[in-house]
Image: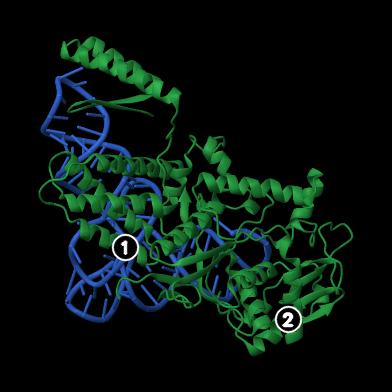
RNA sequence: GGUCGGUUGGCCGAGUGGCUAGGCAACGGUCUGCAAAACCGUGUACGGCGGUUCGAAUCCGCCAUCGACCUCCA
């Protein structure tokens, strides 16, 4: 009873015990990327956060359908060309077909997600592939009387909606406040109220991404795709909707309104929002021009980066902070994460070689239980990691002969670390290469170190140190152990 | 201007009304031919001012400061 998964629901602003709508099954929808630029560190945060949730839900026994969309149409550009589709604009600049741009950046996103060991979702629907479904939602909202047509566009009537249902409950906004803080937007004079938002937009002549509809040749509104696609694949009401905090308003608020207007009921039961990555205390974002792309992290090719970072370092770095906290990027923090992760991964190797004793001086059951408690507490990965490091101490103590572990406990501990470190946290040991070349290479290094052993046996320290120092210079880490040596490539 | 959220030790980052978070870095020790690794041990923290309380970094108020959203955004 006490050990149930709790999730912080933005809607209620508190942690709630997670109970799925249909026992044993979970419907999860997450706002994916808008594919008009290279994937950056900001994209990695929700990807890793909800990947963890996806993995954990499956681990605790749920059958999960995880839907994460690709937004390839429908968002406005933020410069002078108001009303022009972001993707269409980029396409004209680069003289590419819009779908070509979409494909390039979708591929880039997929490639980077794979490097981060983010599992592909169950379904990855594209907005452009669901125009018909979106038009159907527009019709439903019109039929329900919560939208109106104006000059070929269809707008959602926020004020009318707010008379029947609460509007702004997710983001804590009040209609009156919103009315006093609006700004100029394209087509403002077509709207009854500045609060209204387009659910179908008539395309301007230069707008090349367009679809025919009874209202006009145009394109679906900016928030509509998630409503249409989540409903199609998860039903009118589903369990969890995730996304970045910056989407809370207006995007998710609009989704709530659209669903309720179209289907007459609440669509989402648990709203989850991950916080932002910051750079020098400022949000890192494509539109702010301070985003470092994932490719740049992996290659180290960026003025702000001291070095290249392994994708697993990025992943571990994110897991070291709670998903609802902002996470400040710095080389120092990333390198601390890198070293910590190395220590953790090394311990998993040590664990595999451990010998069991007659009894345990360590409490494995307590350790594993603590980790589950932390994970169930709104996916508290930093606490879980703290416990995993306590386990690292145990493992190293046992390896040092300063503690002992029973056969049963050892088996449990191995299974536990395999599950948490690899299956749930999704970490991978870097540089696990194989093949004939590697085997020959390994043997050659072993041979050198064997020569060093011989030199040591003869107390020929000069030769022994020469071999070690030269190998160290080349980039190896040489360690003497009780029964010989070990080495690795740094 | 409105709404919301931060402010924790050298850095990152948890958490809690009284009981060591953790990682990285630092220092001392054990081990080692010397190292490395590992292990053991050690230290300064909770933005400021008031208040509630036996006791607050943790609750309340005020102030300062930073940020997010209100426009596409992960």
Of A40 and A107, nearer the camera is A107
Q: Quadrant of residue B20?
A: bottom left
* Residue B33 screen position, x and y as percent: 14, 20
Rendered green, the chain in question is A
Q: Quadrant of residue A470?
A: top left
Instruction: Tell me the number on the disc at residue A440.
Output: none
Mark 2 element type: helix
**Residue appearing at x 34%, y 42% in the figure:** A345
Q: Chain of mark 2?
A: A
Q: Which residue is mark 1?
A: A372
Q: Quadrant of residue A163?
A: bottom right
Residue A386 left/right relative to A259: left
Rendered blue, the chain in question is B
Q: Which residue is mark 2?
A: A140
Residue A177 left/right relative to B57: right
Q: Which image quarter is the N terminus of chain A in?
A: bottom left
**Residue appearing at x 76%, y 82% in the figure:** A142
Mark 1 element type: helix
Of A226 and A183, nearer the camera is A226
* Residue A64 screen position, x and y as percent: 49, 65
Q: CA distance from mark 2 to mark 1?
A: 44 Å
């Amino acid at each position: 009873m006490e050990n149930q998964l709790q999730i912080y629901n933005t809607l209620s602003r508190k942690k709630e015990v997670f109970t799925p709508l249909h026992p044993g099954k979970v419907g999860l929808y997450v706002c994916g990327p808008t594919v008009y630029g290279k994937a950056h560190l900001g994209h990695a945060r929700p990807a890793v956060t909800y990947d963890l949730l996806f993995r954990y839900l499956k681990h605790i026994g749920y059958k999960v359908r995880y839907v994460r969309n690709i937004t390839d149409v429908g968002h406005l550009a933020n410069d002078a060309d108001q009303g022009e589709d972001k993707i269409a604009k980029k396409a004209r600049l680069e003289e590419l077909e819009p779908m070509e741009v979409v494909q390039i950046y979708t591929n880039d996103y997929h490639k980077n997600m794979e490097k981060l060991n983010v599992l592909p979702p169950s379904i990855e629907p594209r907005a452009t592939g669901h125009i018909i479904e979106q038009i159907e939602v527009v019709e439903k909202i019109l039929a329900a009387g919560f939208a109106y047509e104006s000059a070929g566009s269809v707008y959602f009537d926020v004020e009318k909606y707010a008379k029947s249902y609460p509007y702004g409950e997710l983001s804590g906004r009040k209609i009156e406040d919103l009315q006093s803080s609006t700004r100029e937007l394209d087509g403002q004079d077509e709207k009854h109220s500045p609060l209204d938002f387009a659910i179908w937009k008539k395309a301007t002549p230069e707008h090349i991404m367009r679809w025919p509809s009874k209202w006009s040749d145009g394109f679906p509104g900016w928030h509509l795709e998630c409503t249409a696609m989540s409903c199609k694949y998860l039903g009118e009401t589903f369990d969890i909707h995730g996304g970045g905090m910056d989407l809370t308003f207006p995007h998710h608020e609009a989704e709530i309104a659209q669903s309720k207007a179209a289907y007459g009921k609440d669509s989402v039961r648990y709203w989850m929002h991950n916080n932002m990555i910051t750079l020098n205390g400022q949000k890192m974002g494509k539109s702010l021009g301070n985003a470092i792309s994932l490719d740049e992290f992996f290659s180290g090719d960026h003025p702000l980066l001291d070095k290249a970072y392994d994708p697993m370092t990025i992943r571990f770095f994110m897991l070291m902070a709670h998903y609802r906290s902002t996470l400040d990027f710095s080389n120092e923090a990333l390198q601390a994460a890198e070293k910590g992760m190395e220590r953790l991964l090394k311990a998993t190797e040590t664990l595999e070689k451990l010998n069991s004793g007659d009894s345990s001086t360590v409490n494995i059951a307590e350790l594993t239980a603590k980790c589950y408690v932390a994970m169930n507490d709104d996916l508290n990965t930093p606490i879980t990691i703290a416990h995993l490091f306590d386990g690292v101490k145990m493992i190293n103590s046992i390896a040092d002969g300063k503690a002992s572990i029973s056969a049963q406990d050892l088996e449990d501990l191995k299974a536990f670390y395999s599950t948490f470190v690899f299956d749930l946290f999704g970490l991978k040991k870097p540089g696990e290469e194989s093949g004939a070349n590697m085997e020959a290479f390994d043997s050659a290094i072993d041979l050198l170190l064997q020569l060093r052993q011989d030199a040591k046996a003869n107390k020929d320290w000069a030769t022994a140190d020469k071999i070690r120092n030269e190998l160290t210079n080349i980039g190896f880490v040489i360690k003497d152990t009780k029964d010989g040596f070990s080495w690795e490539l740094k």
